[in-house]
Image (tube, rainbow, N blue to C red):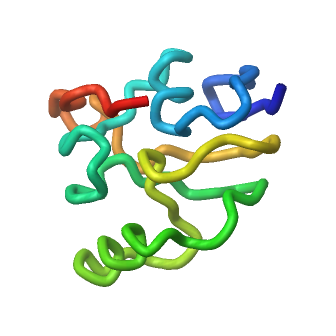
């Protein structure tokens, strides 16, 4: 099984093909996903420190161009874990004082 590392939170195994946002949340990372995983709010963005999630999806390209998001970030609601990776969540409940939002669908 692939492993995801979040600095200051540790490393955990993730079921092959699981959405990154769900893998993070299920392992105690209080990542935001205000729109419920529909790539509208971009609150679930992560910096990819190591690893590869493939090319940006068309949905990510549109969301990033609309919000002016910088290179090197991904929407954790739009990528699936297939290989080991290290990511830094950009927005969490604890850092933003916001509710996470509805849980994204599998």
Which quadrant is home to the N terminus? top right
- At a point 60% along the width and 44% down the height, the residue shown is 80
In front here: 55 or 45?
55
Drawn side of residue 10 relative to residue 76, left or right: right
Image location of residue 50, percent across then percent down = 77, 55
Query: Which quadrant would residue 106 be assigned to in this image?
Result: top left
In front here: 24 or 89?
24
- At a point 16% along the width and 28% down the height, the residue shown is 99
- At a point 32% along the width and 78% down the height, the residue shown is 62
Query: Which quadrant would residue 97 be assigned to in this image?
Result: top left
- At a point 27% along the width and 50% down the height, the residue shown is 38
Query: Which quadrant would residue 82 be assigned to in this image?
Result: top right
Drawn side of residue 53 relative to residue 75, left or right: right
Image location of residue 45, percent across then percent down = 42, 54
In front here: 82 or 100?
82
Vertical placement of residue 38 versus 10, above or below: below
Vertical placement of residue 39 versus 87, above or below: below
Image location of residue 89, percent across then percent down = 48, 44
In front here: 10 or 40?
40
Count numbered badges in the picture: 0
């Amino acid at each position: 099984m692939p492993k995801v590392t979040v600095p200051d939170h540790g490393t955990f195994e993730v079921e092959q093909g699981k959405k990154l946002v769900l893998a993070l949340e299920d392992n105690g990372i209080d990542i935001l996903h205000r729109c419920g995983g529909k790539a509208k709010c971009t609150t679930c963005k992560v910096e990819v420190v190591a690893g590869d999630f493939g090319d940006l999806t068309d949905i990510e390209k549109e969301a990033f161009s609309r919000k002016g998001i910088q290179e090197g970030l991904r929407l954790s609601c739009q990528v699936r874990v297939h290989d080991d990776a290290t990511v830094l969540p950009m927005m969490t409940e604890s850092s933003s004082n916001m509710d996470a939002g509805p849980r994204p669908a599998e």
